[in-house]
Amino acid sequence: MKVLKFGGTSVGSPERMKKLLDIVNPSERQIVVLSAVSGTTNSLVEISQAYLANDKNKALELIKALKDKYEIFIKELFAKDEFLAKGKDLIDYHFYLLTSFSNDLFTPIEEKVVLAQGELISTTLYHIYLQEIGVKSILLPALEFMKIDEDNEPIVDYITEKLTPLLVSDNNLYITQGYICRNSFGEIDNLRRGGSDYTASLIGAGIKAEEVQIWTDIDGMHNNDPRIVKGTTPISHLSFDEAAELAYFGAKVLHPQSVFPAQRYKIPVRILNTMDPKAFGTLISSESSAETIKSIAAKDGITAIKIQSSRMLLAYGFLRRVFEVFERYKTPIDMITTSEVAVSLTIDDTKYLGEITRDLNDFGMVEVDVNQTIICIVGNLGANTHGGAAKIFDALKDIPLRMISYGGSNHNVSLLIRSEDKVETLRSLHQGLFGVN
Ligand code: ADP
Ligand code: ASP
Ligand code: MG
């Protein structure tokens, strides 16, 4: 069985939704994971923010504007009155739910219910559309099998246990929602922005799928951020480790965590272009290809923390005690570099920054730098290769570097820079490493 995930742009208009059947083959067994129609989740975020700020009028205005878009959407999607009426009922139901929050207390629990509406709408609309044109499909409620634990980690065994019995019908085509799940309290929750990729990979892992396909609006993982750098090109093959590194460090085409479940069960992941289905895209598998440097990505919103302590740094157990502070506040560390007198670490989750710096003050002088960016360069950069690092540093001779991490794995160099230098850094690296700008 294959898992095919279509992102927001791929279901972004009635025309695009109809065109999915150029790619989805109803005679092959497959699970189709859909995102919300593009722009919808952003609107739902704005609606939640208005509710959280107790600005009910603004929330209701935003809901009305979004509903108007869907009224037009369904008129173009459905040809027959009977199915248009079903679409209308669906839209009325979900938008009534959104407006009903104006009568109640609005907490983060309701916020997650609001955010879930986009995927619930897109999948049901597509299911009704398939009914209209006589293609049989089964709509699987993701809230019945996607679950995260108290640390927000998805539970693959739960997915296997709950999803497998739902796949027994002799129907081939299953449709389900990306992004949404239930948490350990049984409440509606989500896998964070861009989470439909993660859903697809988790389902792939849960049912040991033959392949996971991520259909999006670009022909694969590119060798740099195409929104910032001109002349980027798709990378045909990436290993799981390389893809995980790029996704985690900012290549938006894949959700940061989405490679891990597929990697664990060695399920190949393809990134493919809905607008150009014949393009090869990117194949992520256990195998890599030989290029020295393959791709560059950038992750913003990083905070660097330096602990200066000539007295303690080299003392036995010092680093363990530093790490314990981060563990206490469940805050992952992305990069780390050490010297004899100081250690620098980076985090992207600053929820407990105050508590962390307070606790670290016991060990020495603490300095915090905000607005930092990690630049991640991925390729074959093991100890028996040479020249890669020289090229990287040559390309960066005019850029102040705050931290450098090299040798942590064979396929990654990470650099920490000021966010204001990001655009110049990505462009200089592209010029220096791939010879184009
Ligand atoms: P979807 O809605 O299909 O999930 P996304 O917008 O989440 O699509 O991801 C696709 C976008 O990611 C592309 O349009 C592109 O602008 C952006 N992107 C950022 N970095 C990369 C990269 N390295 N390779 C390809 N696309 C990238
Ligand atoms: N709709 C969600 C978002 O916009 C999930 C996704 O598109 O993957 O973040
Ligand atoms: Mg995405």
Image (cartoon, rainbow, N blue to C red):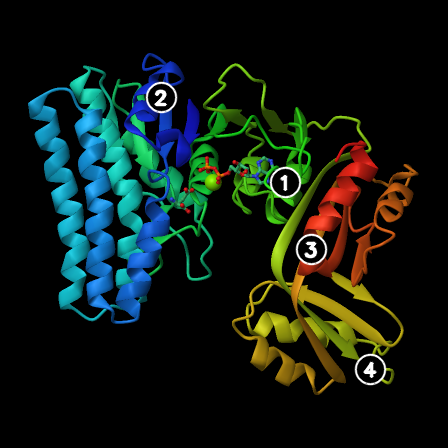
Q: Which residue bears the numbered disc 2? A: 20
- Secondary structure found at label 3: strand
Along the line of sight, which residue is nearer the eye, 386 or 44? 44
Instruction: Residue type at mark 2: give it.
Output: Leu
Q: For the residues marked 1 and 2, what is the alpha-carbon distance in whole angstroms?
A: 26 Å
Q: Which residue bears the numbered disc 3? A: 374
Q: For the residues marked 1 and 4, what is the alpha-carbon distance in whole angstroms?
A: 38 Å
Q: Where is residue 356 drawn, in percent x and y?
A: 61, 78
Q: Estimate how packed mark 3 is, as few (under 14), some (14 to 19) or many (20 or more) residues with alpha carbons within 10 Å.
A: many
Q: Earlier in the sequence, mark 1 or mark 2?
A: 2
Q: Nearer the viewer, mark 4 or mark 2?
A: 2
Q: Where is residue 240 drawn, in percent x and y?
A: 64, 36
Q: Which residue bears the numbered disc 4? A: 309
Q: Is mark 1 within 8 Å of ligand 1?
A: yes
Instruction: Residue type at mark 1: give it.
Output: Asp
Q: Estimate how packed mark 2 is, as few (under 14), some (14 to 19) or many (20 or more) residues with alpha carbons within 10 Å.
A: some
